[in-house]
Amino acid sequence: MRYYILNFFLLVSISSFAQEVDIQLKNVSDTILNPKRVLKITDPIDGVKTMQKLFPGKLYNLADKNTFISWKCKSCKPSPFLDVNGVEGDQLFPYTDGVATRLLANIDYADSKGNQFKVLAFNHSVHDEDGLQTGRFSGGLLGLAKFAKNGNVWEMRSFQPAVAAFGAFAQCPTPKLAEIGEDQFAFTLIHVNGGAGGAYEGYLYLVAGFDGKYQPILEVNNYQLTNSSFISWSGSYTVVNDNTKKHFRDIIIKTKGSYNIAAKAQDEFDVAFPDEIAEMAKTKKSFNFEIERHFSFKGKFYKMIDKPIVKFSNVK
């Protein structure tokens, strides 16, 4: 897990969205954090209205699609959560200064028997009087609520207000659905952060239900690199379905990129090369590369097995 400082210009650009509205906090009961809450919504589900039932604070609809719920829970006992940025100090939710909750995603899927499900994903950030997300050194805290359709009603089957924090400036990346086993669904998130003026490095995370809660079960570094003039790479994943595993199937990560030392003169920032290409970069001027890594679920987490397969092309 890495910790970086983002570009100052990002902070300035975000600050430009400041609203001339005095955002008020509404105190809510600590019962809202109960993972066994019962909630039934008549079809169709409205994501924002459902979010307001889960977090019954005050709803704001500001410019630039900045819709969020502002709330505070004075009677709640804050609990620690993981921020993959590696922020130092205690990270506790609910935040003592109040919470801004936004709808992050509305995900539909069905299993092999035709059962329909819906997952609402939320982003929590520290309350800001201008309705901003300015946690420069912290990620956005992901929350999940899963519903199953029963006739004309969606019944909440699981609720986890705080999973873990990803991304930067208190903005969690949008989770994407991934089927990692027979009727076993998880979510991928590409966590991106980077130093001021330097390259932005992306990690792939997989969040799945395990041991009775949603949690990260895969972390892959060197998945993405942008904002560098002389080297870049991007990753993709494939779930291995060879009928040997019913659940927590193996995952293949392929990272493709290119390197050109001639462009280095235009870039004053260094990049930490993946180990698989570091030696080639010392002796060659340019090349394309592909790194294939194989991950298998071991105990409680995915771990890389075997040695990475590396291919080079257009070597000069």
Image (cartoon, rainbow, N blue to C red):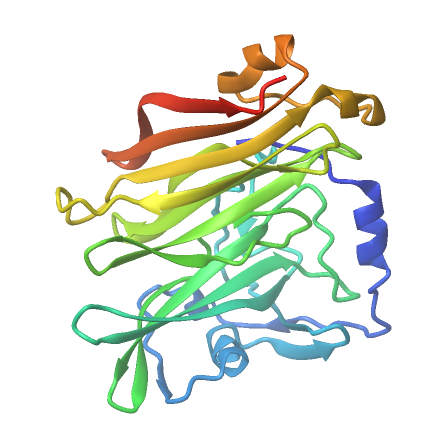
Tell me where residue 123 sits by quadrant: bottom right
Percent coordinates x, y for residue 96 in the rendering: 62, 55
Percent coordinates x, y for residue 15 in the rendering: 83, 57
Percent coordinates x, y for residue 259 in the rendering: 64, 25
Tag count: 0
Residue 161 shows in the view: no
- Residue drawn where x is 75% and y is 32% of the image: 229
Q: Does residue 44 lie above or below 194 as drawn?
A: below
Q: Does residue 283 lie above or below 109 as drawn?
A: above
Q: Nearer the viewer, residue 194 or 264?
A: 264
Q: Nearer the viewer, residue 161 or 1?
A: 1
- Residue drawn where x is 48% and y is 57% of the image: 175
**Relative side of 162 to 259, left or right:** left
- Residue drawn where x is 24% and y is 89% of the image: 151
Q: Nearer the viewer, residue 99 or 309?
A: 309
Tell me where residue 192 sits by quadrant: top right
For the C terminus, the image quarter is: top right
Q: Does residue 302 lie above or below 309 as drawn?
A: below
Percent coordinates x, y for residue 63 in the rendering: 77, 76
Q: Does residue 22 lie above or below 277 as drawn?
A: below
Residue 45 shows in the view: yes
